[in-house]
Image: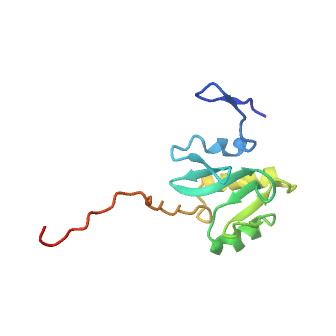
Amino acid sequence: MREPSASRCGRVRPVHRHAWLWEPLESDVTLVVRPMFGAKAAYLDGKLMLCFCTGAEPWNGVLVCTDRSHHPALVAEFPELTPHAILPKWLYLTEAADSFERTARHLVTLARARDPRLGVAPKPKHKSAKSPRRRLERPGL
């Protein structure tokens, strides 16, 4: 396991347990890794591809961000994938699976190759409710 990294504030932060999985993607200039659901989400070309979770089940493994239409093909190739218990629109690979490392590594390879079965475009963020109000124009003023 890698050493903890120092933050800008000088505090030591532990390295994410699954960081080794997205390391092969780090040479891709479009890679963005962001926090999501207490996990780390990997985006390529603006698409959400994979989400790496280290919490308690069902948040301990890899979420495969995909459309439901791709579930049958991905499950046929990787039988250990199942619809996530909370987010069934995505597939889930639990860290408890015997083939976790091999399958997770293969999923990262598919993401890097831009397999069309992987990736979803994130929904645009809603404008804040505190946005400036338009002034109502009153006739004759």
Q: Residue furthest left?
A: 140
Residue at 71% in and 65% down: 91
56 in relation to 7, above or below: below
Please report the residue visible at 65 percent of the width from the left and 43 percent of the height from the top. Answer: 24
Q: Is residue 20 visible?
A: yes
Residue in front for this viewpoint, 39 or 30: 39
* Image position of 20 (left or right of 127): right
Q: Quadrant of the N terminus?
A: top right
**Above or below — where is 41 with respect to 77?**
above
- Name the quarter where the C terminus is drawn: bottom left
Please state the horizontal and vertical placement of residue 99, each as a whole percent of the image.
Answer: 84, 55
* Residue 105 visible (yes or no): no
Left or right of residue 43: residue 110? right
Question: In the picture provided, is 112 more to the left or to the right than 21?
Answer: left
x%, y% of residue 42?
Answer: 61, 50
Looking at the image, the residue that sits furthest to the front is 141
Q: Where is residue 136 in the image (x, y as percent from the top left)?
A: 25, 67
Residues 126 and 116: in front is 126
What count of labels does the image hold? 0
Q: Nearer the viewer, residue 88 or 74?
A: 88
Q: 118 and 94: which one is in front?
A: 94
Q: In this view, does 123 lie above or below 5?
A: below
**What colour-coding does the image apply?**
rainbow
Q: Residue farthest to the top?
A: 10
